[in-house]
Image (cartoon, rainbow, N blue to C red):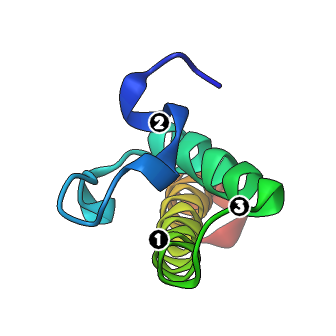
Amino acid sequence: MNGDAAHDDPADQDGDEWIPVEDLGYEEARDELVDVVATLEHGGLDLDASLALWERGEALAKRCEEHLAGARDRIEAAIAESDPDDE
């Protein structure tokens, strides 16, 4: 989808070739998650490959949520610092 060979077909990768989820930025994790979902929806994988891909997708979704929570915390902290009414 994004032209990056590492993300074109996650089903072609085994767990040893994937970039560790904790090393991915939000956009990277989101893009790979989109690819994982598309691959699973397309079907055609054996059970083990499907399960491995589903587990990767779960980890990617969690990583995206962590990034979003961190962004939310930063925004709330910035608002709190700049809001004199809270003092």
Image position of 49 with respect to 67: above or below: below
Residue 16 seen in the figure? yes
The C terminus appears in which quarter of the rendering? bottom right
Residue at 45%, 77% (x, y): give it.
52
Q: CA distance from mark 1 to mark 2?
A: 13 Å
Image position of 19 with respect to 40: above or below: above
Residue 65 or residue 55, whichever sits in front: 55
Task: Give the percent coordinates (x, y) of residue 50.
Answer: 58, 75
Q: Earlier in the sequence, mark 3 or mark 1?
A: 3
Q: Earlier in the sequence, mark 1 or mark 2?
A: 2
SS at mark 1?
A: helix
Residue at 80%, 54% (x, y): give it.
42
Which residue in the protein does label 1 denote? 56
Residue 82 seen in the figure? no
Residue 12 or residue 37, whichever sits in front: 12
SS at mark 2?
A: helix
Residue 64 or residue 59, whichever sits in front: 59
Residue at 34%, 49% (x, y): give it.
24
Looking at numbered disc 3 in the image, what kind of residue is underneath it? Gly
Task: Give the percent coordinates (x, y) of residue 65.
Answer: 59, 69
Q: CA distance from mark 3 to mark 2?
A: 18 Å
Q: CA distance from mark 3 to mark 1?
A: 17 Å
Which residue in the protein does label 3 denote? 44
Task: Give the percent coordinates (x, y) of residue 41.
Answer: 82, 60
Which residue in the protein does label 2 denote? 7
Looking at numbered disc 1 in the image, what kind of residue is underneath it? Arg
Task: Give the percent coordinates (x, y) of residue 75.
Answer: 59, 53
Image position of 60 with respect to 1: above or below: below
Q: Earlier in the sequence, mark 3 or mark 2?
A: 2
